Amino acid sequence: MGKNGMKVLKPEHIGIAIKDLEEGIKFYNDVLGLKLYGRNVLPDRNIEIAQIACGDMELELVQPTSPDSPVAKQIEEKGQGIYHLALQVENIEEALAELKEKGLQLRDQTPRQGLGGARIAFMEPESAFGVTFELIERNDP
């Protein structure tokens, strides 16, 4: 992601693994004054997401809906907290090809459908000092 690396446009959102979505929404609203603006259940991924506006970024509170969910496994192993950092890229196919070329481990070899029509792919944390990165390409700038 250096000078001649893939083009990262901006940090897009931070995913936060959480056990109880209602409690999380209440905390972010009542304590931090941040507002919920979207909520989605993704049955194919065994998660429910609450989208919280936070300046130019968003926070995604991610609650597992099944013990088989990767989010449930992370909460069990590491507790609640930051699950991933999403970076908006200009071209997700080029970004994935570059990461593969550099020998990084990818959870997704090709982009898949994300929220709001975005295309997404995840990197494995072992390739990035323990941080799970989500790459995201949006149609809108």
Image (cartoon, rainbow, N blue to C red):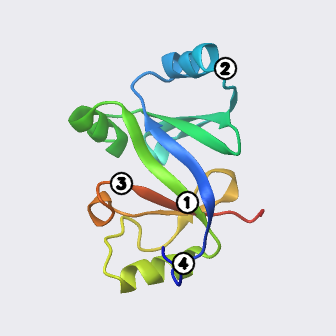
Does residue 111 appear to the left or right of 73 in the view shown?
Answer: right
Does residue 107 appear to the left or right of 56 in the view shown?
Answer: left
The reply to whether callout 2 and callout 4 are in contact (CB within 8 Å) is no
Helix, strand or loop at disc 3? loop
Residue that numbered label 3 is attached to? 131
Q: Residue at x 29, y 40 (%)?
A: 74
- Mark 1 is surrounded, within 10 Å at the Cα level, by few (under 14), some (14 to 19) or many (20 or more) other residues, namely many
The reply to whether callout 3 and callout 4 are in contact (CB within 8 Å) is no
Sequence-wise, the earlier of marks 3 and 2 is: 2
Q: Quadrant of residue 7?
A: bottom right
Question: Three-letter amino acid code at disc 3?
Answer: Val
Alpha-carbon span between mark 3 and mark 2 = 27 Å
- Mark 2 is surrounded, within 10 Å at the Cα level, by few (under 14), some (14 to 19) or many (20 or more) other residues, namely few
Query: Which mark is drawn over residue 64?
Result: none
Does residue 59 appear to the left or right of 134 in the view shown?
Answer: right
Furthest toward the left, the residue is: 77
Residue that numbered label 4 is attached to? 6
Question: Three-letter amino acid code at disc 2?
Answer: Gly
Sequence-wise, the earlier of marks 2 and 4 is: 4
Residue that numbered label 1 is attached to? 87
Q: Position of residue 54 (x, y in %)?
A: 66, 36
Q: Quadrant of residue 100?
A: bottom left
Sequence-wise, the earlier of marks 1 and 4 is: 4
Q: Is residue 31 above or below residue 67?
A: above
The reply to whether callout 1 and callout 4 are in contact (CB within 8 Å) is no
Q: Quadrant of residue 140?
A: bottom right
Quarter placement of the C terminus: bottom right
Sequence-wise, the earlier of marks 2 and 1 is: 2
Question: Three-letter amino acid code at disc 4?
Answer: Met
Question: Three-letter amino acid code at disc 1?
Answer: Leu
Helix, strand or loop at disc 1? strand
